[in-house]
Amino acid sequence: MSSESHNTKIDIKGSAFKKYFFNTSWLFTEKAVRLVVNFLVGIFVVRYLGAELNGIFAYATSLIGILTAVAGLGLTNIITREFVKKENESESILGTAFVLKTASSVLLFLLIIVFYLFADTYENLILLIVSSSLVLSIFDQIEFYFNAKVEAKFPVIVKFLSFIVVDVLKILAIILNLDLVYFAAIFSLEKLILSAGLWYLYQRRKGTIFNWSFDKVRAKQLLTDSWPLMFSTIAVTIYMRIDKVILKELMNSEAVGIYDAAVRLCEGWYFIPMAISSSLFPAIVNAKKKSEKLYNNRLQKLYDLMVFISLGIAIPITIFSEEIITIAYGSDFIEAASVLTIYIWAGIPVFLGTANSQYLINENFTKISLARTVIGMILNIALNFLLIPKYGLAGSAWATLISYSVATFYIFVYPQSRYQFILMIKSLFLIRLISGKYFNGK
């Protein structure tokens, strides 16, 4: 083996690897515990609310999810990159991101208030309460700061405590037989607790937020870099949430509630690629500085890992879909099983797409990211309107699977990203596993 090939291996005994490994472990632990606890509590909440009320709540959170993407301005990965590249300018980065996000969040919340004043209905009341989460999430950038510093354990502890408190409140709401309004309030309360915790964490470990500064030049540069990602994030959120909105319009709240029950079991796993990618993003950035071969080697292994994990999730859930739905939600939700067997396979393009997005960001191919996401969004909307009238809930699930797949592999269209398409295809068809290269470290 040549020295060049040897250099592409990751030193598992090195301090850098251990640092990233433990950082990923913290992210995984919090997300895994959240998955289990939220899944169990979510079962009781869905059972308690029933299909119709669960549909109303899912409809509201889907709309707010889209607006949250708008309020974020696509800054998440951009400021993470800036924290890594410009370590000594963190206060300016934090302050500028804070002002930009706060302004956008407040503006959107005011628009929702105006909308509610002109349409005072129960469903819009739920929407108004849930929308308050927009202005209660203004310190999110602190979490990205700690992640960039490979210190994920600190925000993880805050997030762990916040969701435990919230899940306890959900259980109390069920015991006390409270209205859906209280569940909407609890949804927003979690954002408040998390923001307060992140603020306290930063004050204790890094200094006061009053040292943050707003830089107009930096703001302009951040927005210039992030606007393709902003539209990409909005497009991603739309085609991940729009199915429930369209279902509500073409069918009813009960259909949304049944569909949402299945989607919960699928999207609950999406923390895995996000946790891995966000934690390894600094390592991928640094690999580019060393060599192109090391860079692509790490990306290939990341794609391989994503396929292995997503297949390991999809196969058993497909086989036991009816049993899973019946045990989780009861026989009243059995129709969700057909959705589950289709939707769960969307995890493969989601896992690969999440990993590949790190490459696009690092190469500053944000316009490619935007293009493939917009294609996926348009296709998803069109397929939902086409397939739901014919196939009902299953039609919406097929629309999601097809559009996610097209969006992920759309990078083939562009010559500069076509090699990454080849790497993902190798992973998808298990070429490296079959050839033995994955376990040989080649």
Image: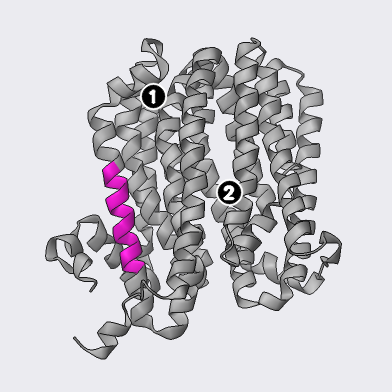
Residue type at mark 1: give it: Leu
Quadrant occupied by the N terminus: bottom left
Q: Secondary structure at mark 1?
A: helix
Q: Is residue 207 above or below residue 38?
A: below
Residue reaching furthest left?
Answer: 435
Residue 5 placement (x, y as % from top left): 26, 84
* Magenta span of residues: 299-312
- The part of the image, by quadrant, that contains residue 192 is top right
Q: Earlier in the sequence, mark 2 or mark 1?
A: 2
Left or right: 276 in relation to 108? left
Q: Is residue 338 above or below residue 224?
A: above
Cβ–Cβ under 8 Å for marks 2 and 1: no
Residue 441 placement (x, y as % from top left): 24, 71
Q: Secondary structure at mark 2?
A: helix
Quadrant occupied by the C terminus: bottom left
Q: Which residue position holds label 1?
A: 393
Disc 1 packing (10 Å; few <14; some 14–19; many ≥20): many
Res. 328 in view: yes
Q: Which of 383 and 49 lies nearest the eye of the viewer? A: 49
